[in-house]
Amino acid sequence: MSPSPRSPKAVPGGAWQALARPGFLRSPWPWRSVGYLLATGGSGLLLCLLLVLGAVVAGGLAMVLIGLPLLAALALVGLPYAALERRLLRLLPDRTPVESPHRTPDGPGLPAWLRTRYREQATWRELGCTALAALLLWPIDLTAVGCAVFVPLWLLATPVLLALDGEQVNVLKVWQIHDQPTALALALAGAVLFAALSYPLTAVAAGRATLVRRLTGRTEPDHRIGELVRSRARLVDAFEAERRRIERDLHDGAQQRLVALAMNLGLARLDAPTDSLLAGRLADAHREVGQVLAELRELINGIHPQVLADRGLPEAVADLADRSPVPVDLDFELPGRPPPAVEAAGYFAVAEALANLAKHSGANRARLTGRYADGRLGVEVSDDGRGGADPARGTGLTGLADRLAVVDGTLTVSSPPGGPTLLRLEIPCTLTDPSPPRSE
């Protein structure tokens, strides 16, 4: 598909490449540079005035603590201004478009958005760009346009101004011109000067645009990190889909065949003579098939429990709590269903936490809670055991943290010697379909 006329790729090369071409003066690049520097200089001047006013107001109100939120909000002033700068870069299009460096917040709502933005390096790079534009760059922009455009235009207008006045004209408030030949010479000098200054003017504009691209655009590490995140998400989804496929094949294939075999062996036992050698061998085979079937069901449950796929995370966690050797008080409610990868990670993390609790804690009772708030699934597992859980000692907590890290989750452990122990799991996600009702 061919690029649209407004696409950056519609213009061959960028300003730096245009400077090296023979037809530069006949191209639109000098005028693009003038428009770009006028826009950035004017917006920078306005930004400077607004920042000074905002700082004065916030500083005055800080005496009564009202201005503190305003001062904190000044750190985010770079976000809209950087977006404006990226839009102004369309006046100097390049082969590579400028993408926003910001990532999607972890969840809905203002708190999640603020948390994400304050933690991003891009926010502080854009704040630095905003400070440069407000304090340093706008005078350079306007000075460059004044020297490269308005001075030559003034010289070019000298004959017209002299004709209108009839006697004399002050050129640049320095020279007094009384005759038309001198005025025409100055006009010619203005034309030559405008052509000569178009090159440094475009270089200034291109240099400023390059700086803005580096400060407000997505950097190469950002591209690599973004691709790694997307690649990891694809791998997690593929792994989860493969695990579901294996679970389905075992459930619908091997398990059903073993069930049929067990039924046939049971019928054969009924037909065999009582207390015969054949009846004994059929009974042994029937028992072995039953054990294999039980082990296969445990294996299927370990790959991907059916209750998790059918009923959701709260019901699956309730099943884990029921099967735990340590009594568990359960308080787990979700207003919807997380993505399958998050559900699986949360389920197996809870399963591993309860297994570690039963093996190492010496607890008499445990408590398991789960909530969804601020775009994050939070699960807490606590017990009244001996404490002293340390991921460095290989108690399974390291593997649990690694499992959560696959879906950007975090693990927090509080386990002083003597107890109690508290494990908190947090996974950023967005809930989709409503959770099915808990079965009684």
Image: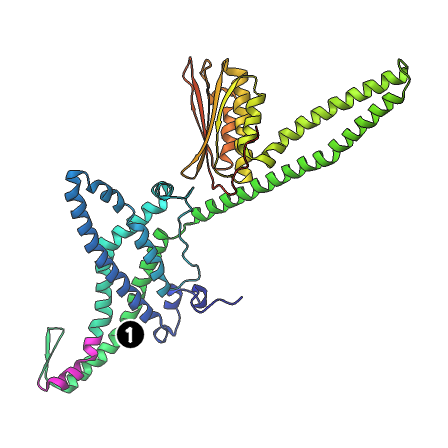
Query: Is the N terminus in the top left, top right, bottom left or bottom right quadrant?
Result: bottom right
Residue 411, position as x, y percentages in the image:
45, 29
Residue 425, position as x, y percentages in the image:
46, 30
Q: Left or right: where does residue 410 sit relative to residue 286? A: left
The answer to whether residue 15 of the structure is visible from this angle is yes
Decide: is 255 above or below 86.
above
Residue 3, position as x, y percentages in the image:
48, 66
Residue 330, position as x, y percentages in the image:
49, 24
Amino acid type, residue under disc 1 in the picture: Ala
Look at mark 1 in the image and give the residue it sits on.
195
Front-most of 402 and 324?
324
- Res 205 → quadrant: bottom left
Residue, far front: 440
Query: Magenta part of the protein: which range?
Result: 153-167
SS category of the residue bearing label 1: helix
The answer to whether residue 304 of the structure is visible from this angle is no
Decide: is 279 above or below 143.
above
Q: Left or right: where does residue 111 sit relative to residue 4? A: left
Residue 102 part of the magenta-drawn span? no
Q: Tell me which secondary structure the magenta stretch mostly adopts.
A: helix
